[in-house]
Image: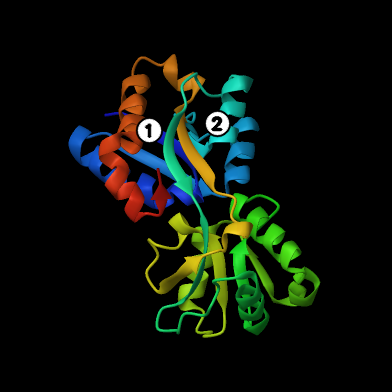
């Protein structure tokens, strides 16, 4: 039995977990995956941190720009495989009426009315940087400073929102970190002027590709995740093509 170790951006967590279930069933192999903000996962890789149970990382899923950087550095093997693009959206707790976020003016009013704005930490997360840029364009980061609540990734932010008990709390993160989470409702995408859609991609690591036991399994996993057959599953998770 092969044990694959995967590092993945939180924006791909639902998709990766779906593929893990099928991969394990079909192959009899095992998978251990760690999820987090894209920047944190990249840093973990480049710092030489090992994967689960001390094994080297075999597959990494990050933004296309980060994967290209890891290929250039020699950490990832040549060959980037794209999952698709992900936009950023707004969420509220399930059962709460959807606020209006259809324009800059409406979004500004909705955020001002929110008790908490929950989103990924902009220091490490792609979505967090997008949210902070949005607040800057709206001219309200200072006004909302005490209501901004940072999380390690969008998945963590949405899980907090789901159980927060606060009907005035607002969540903002990438669509693929909203749609799969029970207990939250997807409101709508951010208006176009605040969008910065990120493409997420997968690659095998160079260390994996020189391991004759690991390489075929890793390539199989990446193929399952990024193939055309995976698109319905990816679309349901919030990806665009």
- Relative to the observer, which residue lies in front, 49 or 166? 166
- Look at mark 2 in the image and give the residue it sits on: 67
Which mark is in front, 2 or 1? 2
Q: Residue at x 44, y 34 (%)?
A: 82
Q: Residue furthest left?
A: 26
Q: Residue at x 40, y 83 (%)?
A: 95
- Image height check: is 222 above or below 41? above
- Look at mark 1 in the image and give the residue it sits on: 4
- Image height check: is 85 above or below 138? above
**Image quarter hosting the C terminus:** top left
Q: Circle 2 — which element?
A: helix
Left or right for 127, reference 5: right
Q: Residue at x 33, y 19 (%)?
A: 213
Q: How far across and how far down the image is residue 26, in percent?
A: 19, 36
Q: How far across and how far down the image is residue 234, in percent?
A: 35, 47
Q: How far across and how far down the image is residue 145, in percent?
A: 76, 72
- The 10 Å Cα crowd at callout 1, few under 14, some 14 to 19, many 20 or more, is many
Left or right for 24, reference 208: left
Q: Residue at x 32, y 30 (%)?
A: 223
Q: How far across and how far down the image is residue 21, in percent?
A: 27, 46
Query: Is residue 49 among what the camera can see?
Result: no
- Dividing the picture into quadrants, the one containing residue 38 is top right
- Dividing the picture into quadrants, the one containing residue 63 is top right
Left or right for 74, reference 83: right
Q: Are marks 2 and 1 in contact (CB under 8 Å)?
A: no
Q: CA distance from mark 2 to mark 1?
A: 18 Å
Snapshot colouring: rainbow
Left or right for 228, reference 118: left
- The 10 Å Cα crowd at callout 2, few under 14, some 14 to 19, many 20 or more, is many
Q: Circle 1 — which element?
A: strand
- Looking at the rendered structure, the number of numbered marks drawn on it comes to 2
């Amino acid at each position: 039995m092969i044990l694959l170790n995967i590092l993945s951006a939180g924006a791909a967590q639902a998709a990766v977990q779906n593929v893990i279930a099928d991969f394990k069933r079909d192959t009899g192999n095992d998978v251990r995956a760690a999820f987090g903000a894209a920047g944190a996962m990249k840093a973990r890789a480049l710092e030489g941190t090992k994967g689960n149970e001390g094994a080297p990382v075999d597959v990494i899923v990050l933004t296309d720009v980060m994967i290209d950087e890891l290929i250039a550095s020699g950490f990832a093997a040549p060959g980037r495989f794209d999952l698709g693009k992900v936009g950023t959206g707004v969420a509220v707790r399930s059962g709460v009426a959807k606020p209006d976020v259809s324009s800059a003016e409406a979004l500004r009013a909705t955020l001002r009315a929110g008790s908490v704005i929950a989103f990924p930490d902009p220091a490490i997360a792609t979505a967090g940087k997008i949210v902070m840029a949005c607040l800057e364009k709206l001219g309200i980061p200072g006004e909302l400073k005490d209501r901004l609540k940072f999380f390690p990734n969008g998945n963590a932010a949405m899980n907090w929102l789901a159980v927060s008990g606060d009907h005035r709390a607002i969540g903002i993160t990438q669509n693929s970190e909203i749609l799969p989470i029970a207990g939250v409702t997807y409101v709508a995408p951010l208006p176009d002027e605040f969008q910065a859609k990120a493409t997420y991609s997968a690659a095998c690591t160079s260390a994996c590709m020189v391991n004759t036991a690991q390489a075929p399994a890793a390539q199989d996993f990446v193929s399952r995740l990024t193939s055309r057959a995976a698109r319905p599953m990816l679309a349901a998770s919030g990806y665009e093509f």
